[in-house]
Image (cartoon, rainbow, N blue to C red):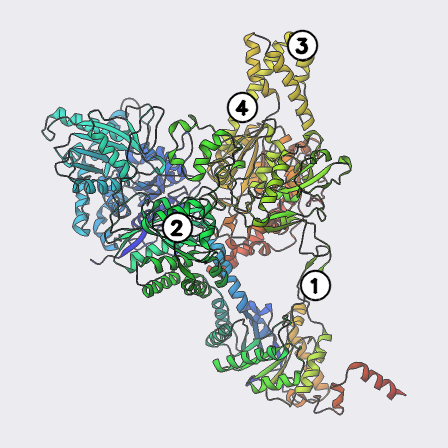
Amino acid sequence: MNRQMVTIDGNEAAAYIAHKTNEVIAIYPITPSSSMGEWADAWSAVGKKNIWGTTPVVTEMQSEGGASGAVHGALQTGALTTTFTSSQGLMLMIPNMYKIAGELTSTVFHVAARSLAAQALSIFGDHSDVMAVRGTGFALLASASIQEVMDFALIAQAATLETRVPFLHFFDGFRTSHEVNKIEQLTEDDMQAMIDDELVRSHRARALSPDHPVLRGSAQNPDVYFQGRETVNRFYLDCPAIVQKTMDKFAGLVGRQYKLFDYAGAPDAERVIVLMGSGAEAVQETVDYLVKRGEKVGVVKVRLYRPFSVEHFMKALPPTVKTIAALDRTKEPGSLGEPLYLDMVAAISETVAKKNGSLNAFPRLIGGRYGLSSKEFTPAMIKGVFEEMKKAEPKNHFTVGINDDVTHTSIAYDPAFSTEPDEVVRAMFYGLGADGTVGANKNSIKIIGEDTPNFAQGYFVYDSKKSGSVTVSHLRFGPRPIHSTYLVNKANFIGCHQFGFVEKFAMLPDLVEGGTFLLNSPYGPEEVWEHLPRQLQEQLIAKQAKFYVIDGYTVAKETGMGARMNTIMQTCFFAISGVLPREEAIEAIKAAIKKTYGAKGDEIVQMNYRAVDQTLDRLYEVKVPNKVTSTFDRPPVVPKEAPDYVKNVTAKIIAGYGDELPVSAMPVDGTFPTATTMWEKRAIALEIPIWDKEICIQCNKCALVCPHAAIRVKIYEEKELAGAPATFDSTDYREREWKGMKYTVQVAPEDCTGCGICVEICPAKNKRETRLKAINMKPLLEHRDRERDNFDFFLKLPEVDRRKVKVNSVKGSQLLQPLFEFSGACSGCGETPYVKLVSQLFGDRAVIANATGCSSIYGGNLPTTPWAKNPEGRGPAWSNSLFEDNAEFGLGFRVTLDKHKEQAEELLRGLQAELGSALVQEILAADQSNETGIYAQRERVAQLKAKLATLHAPAAKNLLSLADYLVKKSVWIIGGDGWAYDIGYGGLDHVLASGKNVNILVLDTEVYSNTGGQMSKATPRGAVAKFAAGGKPRPKKDLAMLAMSYGNVYVARVAMGASDTQTVQAFVEAEQYDGPSIIIAYSHCIAHGINMTKGMEQQKFAVNSGYWPLFRYNPVLATEGHAPLHLDSRAPSIPVKEYMYRETRFKMLTKSDPVSAERLLKLAQEDVQSRWQMYEHLATFNRAGSNGKPVAAAAAAPAENETK
Amino acid sequence: MDLTTRYLGRKLKNPLVASASPLSRHLDNIRRLEDAGAAAVVLFSLFEEEILHETRELDHYLTYGSESYAEALNYLPAPSEFYLGPDEYLEHIRQAKAAVHIPIIGSLNGVSPGGWINYARKIEAAGADALELNLYYIPTDPALASDDVERLYLNTLKMVRQSVNMPVALKLSPFFSAMANMAKQFDEAGANALVLFNRFYQPDIDLENLEVTPNVILSTPQAMRLPLRWIAILYGRIKADLAATSGIHTAPDVLKMLMAGANVTMMASALLHHGIGHIRQVLREMEIWMEKHEYESVQQMQGSMSQKAVAEPAAFERANYIKALHSFQTAF
């Protein structure tokens, strides 16, 4: 049969089979499995059919718990149903998995296996999640490669129908889910041949139907539950043989023979590693290498892990085996060993006990952990394991790949060992996310995979920063299928797509001798050498590298490519590497361009063609001199003033050497110091804002909107200017009550991302030249050194006395120190200005519960932490529990804080005699409703603590440990709309109903931003999002209205860009309100497809069109006889179209489905009108005081932006 | 009463044509224009620059931020097909042709030589009855001489003329040093009609925000004087048809233009202001006037007040204040 070779990743391979062999697909986004759902949704959206000729229904749910519930329901009513998930998502599915298995229901869940959040969250791959569902009764089938993902997806589907045991088909997150490889694509004929329609009909016949009613899901008592539970045994006993039979059938059809346990290696092997997943590929590669060199080693690749067949396993194991190492990609603290190890122990013990003769003697058995969270697992490490197995007393319960210098579990290995064959060409490319390097490499792999007989593999390493992020692509290609499931470290070709990287990364250690280095350089072949740091020159000489330069920046500029280097660098790669004859390569690149960009119009295709054509003229070989002439080195990663922890640990992670850190360098419980982003000077902006004090009107709006706290204001006394750098700018502060003070607006040049939002918002124009404002973007290179010194001096200026500041104004709030700074959020992020505002207004007393999502990543992803401290050492304490439980997590904070305070007050009263009643009564009666009150209470508590320190009674010691809780604490529960509207809504609703004093901030980007823009219930009608490719047909949920329905919840809807005054007021009121508060904040987002520089302006359009009415609902007003709802924006003044069609998420629908776009636009306009009428109506009601009768609306003057 | 006229090689039932405006973006409006009596419709312009901008914008935003961060390799779904650029416009022509019986005239504004030719051909293939070239160039470069600009106009016209078989009209700006000579050159280069004159968005200054705010101001009846003069001057001197546009709001305006020598008169602002039904009223008033003044046909009056036909040809040549002075002297 003629099967097509395709170059795809693991997720696409799994989704391809799942979509073809199911009728219902319930999905929910979670990394790294999201794209399986996205593929399925996209295929159904264009009407792609399954093998029975019908298009599967794809339904997005509110959580993985919801998805598994929907799957259970769909299965119970007879549909072939599947889902895709990972990690925490799989955890949420566990209850339904027990049900589905208990009811012997045929289904396959496809899982991109990922670490579970323990001491920290990790999005990367290991088997912690799948190992946690061993008890559910699902069969566990492991794929090790992209080809296997496709093959096993089908084998699982066929086997589940015959066995009635549900299957969890898993493969390694990222390493397999995201690796691109050339594989043979199964055909519909293959699928039809594998899947027995009679079994499908049987599945359907078992469905719940009123036409032949049954009951399933009963409750059983002690008398029969046990027996009932044992009924399934037969199915599990039969399962392995059926899976093997299915594998054999597949082999007959397709030619690839799989076994439940596949053995590879010497037939007389004495040392055998047993493992599952992608690591098995690397082990096989190593085994092949070692066997050729006479070593008696082998590997058992576990395919069907559950139900575990001892019989099949023993058959796979060579009888000569003396030592077995079971390698687990998971950790079970406190257990006797990890799951596979324990299974080996049991299997071998049982076998030996039976004395059935398949083993000559009880082999030595050791277990080890490897590869947690996608930790590299290389042939060098594998060789290390085999070496360990040789020892007389090999280490058991070992780890490999890390340096455990605490409990000494790790085994040693020689990192220089390599099995990379000469026939494989290996290349690495360093790029920026924004320059399209990864996309180009994906295209290159497709070209090589599809236009040549070569096999190809690509794997991509991304940054955890969302702005200025660096990508490293690892490509291999060669005449045979590529099984190297680890990063390239002996590259024949290294491409550096950004010149700035020569000072940031040591790229050439990975280059083989005589390898090629291609550099995108604004300097030509004659002059580039003198611009390279010493280390790079040394390595180029030492490795006798071939060195090429291309001025990709100029080509990109001239051809309209902008920042995108993709096509240019790809052309260079093909031209230099000789993978294809040059003409053929260019033709192939152009064909790929046509395929990739064709849908976006001819202009884009032509632009890329021009880039290809112009590239070759500017590609030069550089003659590498024979001696080092450079006088400069790569600068240190962090400055010498940084704390030791930052220098010794953080800096290594920043520099890309985190793998070298030993166990002892990591905190034991996941606790990290805050305020460390300040040491990571990324300098990623091309231009930064420079202040013009003559034009400035001192409104402080620039500081308010800055997403990265990289532009700041301070007022200070003139004497503080002593010792200021000569270039430090200062002017008189114009506020009357601060007469005599000086004022400065200062940029943090190396922390600014160059988004330009500050300049955009600046209302002051230069009267002589109106294009200039009070701040203007200027080239970083020209201003970096000067402004760095200025910023250092600025930081040393004293912080303002918070008691004297009008905190509920834009101007006042921005005089407060930001305690959230320099995060890794997107340049121009719409969320972080709100987060930063919280940190300014309440940071010195805030405990923050942060839902998983963008804000937990830019707020809590290593290496550095943007949450900061004030000079007194106070600042936000931050934690992330899960995605779904954030409101409850924050409520837990509140309950504790209240309890601690109550207990402290009780102790205080009890110790009144010793402490003096004046102090005690003052503390108990303190008014902490404002900064002055809080300051005074802190002073009192300081006095109290001083006194307590002199007392020895247990009550005094207890009070000393609780005394700080007598000072007001502010609980902030922060998360995105995916959390608040969907997965966490149940908990959020409960917390709103609790009456507790918590503050909830919903950063509403209207999609799941962190996982790439999937639809949530916050997504507006008519917007295109993932899982809503045809435009969301239904309107956005009105979360504010739901919250207001309680009557005792403070609710505000804000949009900083439309009304900064109202935003600041709402934050202050929400915190002051002694009860639950929720602020729903419009957050423009990269996923909206907008110019992020204009994000704040876009908020204005949202409000002016009535799409996002601003209001505050303050229950306190009701008790005072006013209407609690106060509308803060005017009636819609522009059609909603004027807002919507400024954003690609709406506008693209007019290009893909104009008819729907027009219909949805009309409905969206109707939504706006009806909602406005309803709010206007509500604004006249005082529910508390007037028994529902209309009352006068509270002062209706809308709060506009604070006047200039 | 014979209201028929000839324009771009075909007979029209009357001389009222809807000129390029946002009205023609909706098929319903085109139907209503026909129902109200419009003899032909010039569609809104296809702007090559806009197409390029939209295409690049879409590409930019669909790829912006992609392949940068492991959890979000992109942010928007990429439909396999987009209706981009001319496709939408061409489909609109097809639908308009199917919806009405009156001629549909495409309108094109290009930026590149390839664009002009490519899109003109596509518009013809989509079934347009004729093409109006919305040709303008604001020559801001001080190094660019007037003959360079004139050559640009002529070359574009020639290029398009050679690429299509349908009649081609040229919508002109009034800013030529030698209008009559240019008209002759356009005539010789094969223009089937000259449309006088194009109106541009003109910049304004927002004093409060210190911003330049380009906006459209609908034409006023006074605006018709300029095309009136040049139509009267050109009538009978060139082969190309003459279409009057700008400031035509009422039946008297139409009558004046016809008398000056226009084959057709075009309306946009008046329709935007008064509604599409305004055409019906203008036609009725025209008929009443013609009946009252015993005109038999439109063709009878066409050119009757052109420079060639009037008693005092110099009236079209003089600047206003001289004529005013002359009148004053005559009065004495």
Q: Badge 3 sits on which subunit?
A: A
Helix, strand or loop for disc 2: helix
Asked whether the residues under marks 4 and 3 belong to the same chain, the reply is yes
Point out the image quarter for the N terminus of chain A. Answer: bottom left
Q: CA distance from mark 2 to mark 4?
A: 42 Å
Q: Is residue B254 left or right of residue A32?
A: right
Q: Badge 4 sits on which subunit?
A: A
Label 2, on which residue? Answer: A41
Amino acid residing under circle 1: Asp
Amino acid residing under circle 4: Val
Q: Are marks 2 and 1 in contact (CB under 8 Å)?
A: no
Q: Is residue A1109 left or right of residue A335?
A: right
Label 1, on which residue? Answer: B204
Mark 3 or mark 2: whose residue is earlier in sequence: 2
Q: CA distance from mark 3 to mark 2?
A: 70 Å
Label 3, on which residue? Answer: A916
Q: Residues within 10 Å of mark 1 (few under 14, many from 20)?
A: few
Q: CA distance from mark 1 to mark 4?
A: 60 Å
Say the numbered circle drawn on residue A895.
Answer: 4
In the depicted view, which residue is nearer to us: B30 or A339?
A339
Amino acid residing under circle 2: Asp
